[in-house]
Image (tube, helix red, strand yellow):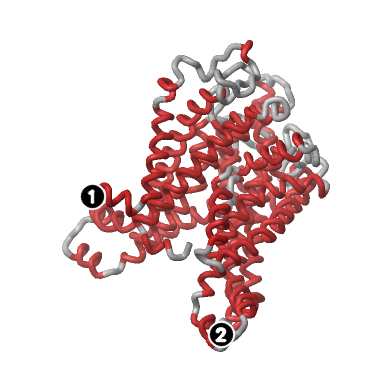
Amino acid sequence: MGRKQILSRLAQMLVVLIGISIITFLLTYLSPGDPVRNMYLAQGLMPDEAQVAVLREEMGLNDPFMVQYFRWLGNCLRGDFGTSFALQKPVVTLLAARLWPTLKLALFSMVLMLIAAVPLGVLSAVYQDKPIDYLVRAITFFGVSIPNFWVGLLLILLFCVQLRLLPVVSSGGTFKDMILPAATLAVAMSAKYTRQVRTAVLEELHSDYVIGARARGVAEWKILWGNVFPNSLLPLITMLGLSVGSLLGGTSVVEVIFSYPGMGNLAVQAITSYDYYLIQGYVLWVAIIYMVINLLVDVSYNYVDPRMRLRR
Amino acid sequence: MEKKSFIRKYPVFVVFAVLALLIVLAAIFAPQLCGDVSPIKGSLKDSIKPPCAEHPFGTDKMGRDIFVRVLYGARTSLSSTFILVGVIFVIGTFLGILAGYFGGWVDTVIMRLADMMIAFPGLVLAIAVAGILGASTRNAIIAIAVVSWPKYARLARSLVMKIRHTDFVAAAMVTGSRTPSMLWKYMLPNTITTLVITAATDIGGMMMELAALSFLGFGAQPPNPEWGSMLNEGRNFMQSAPWLMIYPGLAIFVTVVVFNMLGDGLRDILDPRSNEGR
């Protein structure tokens, strides 16, 4: 990407960001419940009507939509995402405390996923239509068909209840606590990714330069790891960036199962207690993280693919 | 004669079509299959029984038969999944065709909207929407539909754009076809095969997403039987009664496998080219 492309990309991002902020704001603006009433309920109080009316006015909930939106946006830009009703703390503080555990979990499961998916995918492509290929394809097929929350529960049943090797509740966020949640996330993801590795490598294996290299007597492993694999990296990095999306969404389910102290778990709690500002903050943060990661992926093309640099 | 050759040609598809049909029939005739055993009312004297002859999948803490609940759960899961896929298919295709056909500001508005939806990763927005609308099957369907239509819209748009400027389309316009008939007779048929394949292969995934929302408590509500929420209930009895979470999970898994195979089979029949890359 040249400078011009990066600039146009940033402009696009800005449009999408504005969109994200509008959708996030609409989420709570359109919600059927009354935030003030829910705020009281979240604290276990029964509000009386006069109080509700006063607070509504105070919080500006009677203002027109655009006024409310811009006030909210301005606050967000200044880093003020509101205060959680239920937990009585600023949303920023709450989310910031949970951010690293979630990222750590996502990163760890991604490493696990790569360890499984890259060798399997390459193997399956190299031995296309041989028994090992069929085996890998069967495994990946079952991998994508198994719901990840069930995988999590089965892993708990096996490792925590039957074998008693690991803790059931991963609330500490230590390395040991991360093993099962990360493994759970890695199962479905590696199944998908193995397929993509296989497709990408197969495509390269069928290109002319491979035939040429073979004809010149270059060793097969040299062709594979020296040419084919590096060339198939580009689509794989794109897929990796995209899979971060399903990962960030998937963590919430897994975090709930393992009581892992991440953002997703916090968000699910927030939803059950109608903690609107916290939900808003979570959705906004995750969308922005996802966007930044995909931008980094695009920028990384520069380094992975020399053709991109030449295009400038 | 012709039927036989079809079976020979696509044995995998036929096998899984029959299996899928069996699952659908089991869901439809759940009341008949279960006799008069209720999926909601149980007797407390039967509470937490391991699988036995009388209760093949065991019972839960309310003394309800898990087999019966799994069978009834198929109704909720299948019907909500089919509705969801149908809704996404119709809305996504419609908006995608409009965007591709008209171009200009229509295209810009629809596709920017799609970009924004795609900017939210995975289930994140769906969880928030389902949570804020309130927990129910209908709201879970709305939540996932809101975040899933862009995939179909993008696909439909790109397919329409491919033929938009071909000669036969120009000829049809010159000979005075009106816009609705252009969309209906020329654009739709050119997108439908690919989109049907996409929808068929999506059924399994959508079923899992709906189950995930119910599992979190944002979908079907207890005591109504639904696989995801049954798993959530069973989670608390993992040590004493693991069958509570094994059978509903197995039901999701088997159903998803069958529908995924069916979708793949349908793709191989309708679009033989796609088979090569796999």
Q: Residue at x 46, y 65 (%)?
A: B277
Left or right of A162, for residue B30: left
Indicate which label's residue lies in the foreground, 2 or 1.
1
Q: Vertical placement of B156 versus B251: above or below? A: below
Task: Tell me where residue A26 appears, x and y as whole percent.
Answer: 56, 42
Looking at the picture, tell me which residue is in the foreground, A193 or A79: A193
Task: Tell me where residue B240 appears, x and y as whole percent.
Answer: 71, 25
Which element is circle 2 on? helix
Looking at the picture, tell me which residue is in the foreground, A6 or A256: A256
Report in which chain the residue with disc 2 lies: A
Q: Residue at x 47, y 53 (%)?
A: B151
Q: Which residue is mark 2?
A: A213
Task: Tell me where residue B30 appears, x and y as whole percent.
Answer: 43, 24
Task: Tell me where residue A209 appears, x and y as whole percent.
Answer: 53, 83
Q: Quadrant of the N terminus of chain A?
A: bottom right
Left or right of B43, for residue B109: left
Displayed quadrant of residue A3: bottom right
Furthest residue toward bottom: A216
Q: Are marks 2 and 1 on the same chain?
A: no
Mark 2–mark 1 distance (CA, rounded to whole Å) = 48 Å
* Residue A10 visible, this angle: no
Given the image, on which type of amino acid does mark 2 rest? Answer: Ala
Q: Quadrant of the C terminus of chain A?
A: bottom right
Q: Which mark is residue A225?
A: none
Given the image, on which type of amino acid does mark 1 rest? Answer: Glu
Crowd around label 2: few <14 · some 14–19 · many ≥20 (10 Å): some
Q: Residue at x 70, y 30 (%)?
A: B238
Crowd around label 1: few <14 · some 14–19 · many ≥20 (10 Å): few
Q: Which mark is residue B2?
A: 1
> Do callouts 2 and 1 mark residues in contact (Cβ within 8 Å)?
no
Report in which chain the residue with disc 1 lies: B
* Residue A251 visible, this angle: yes
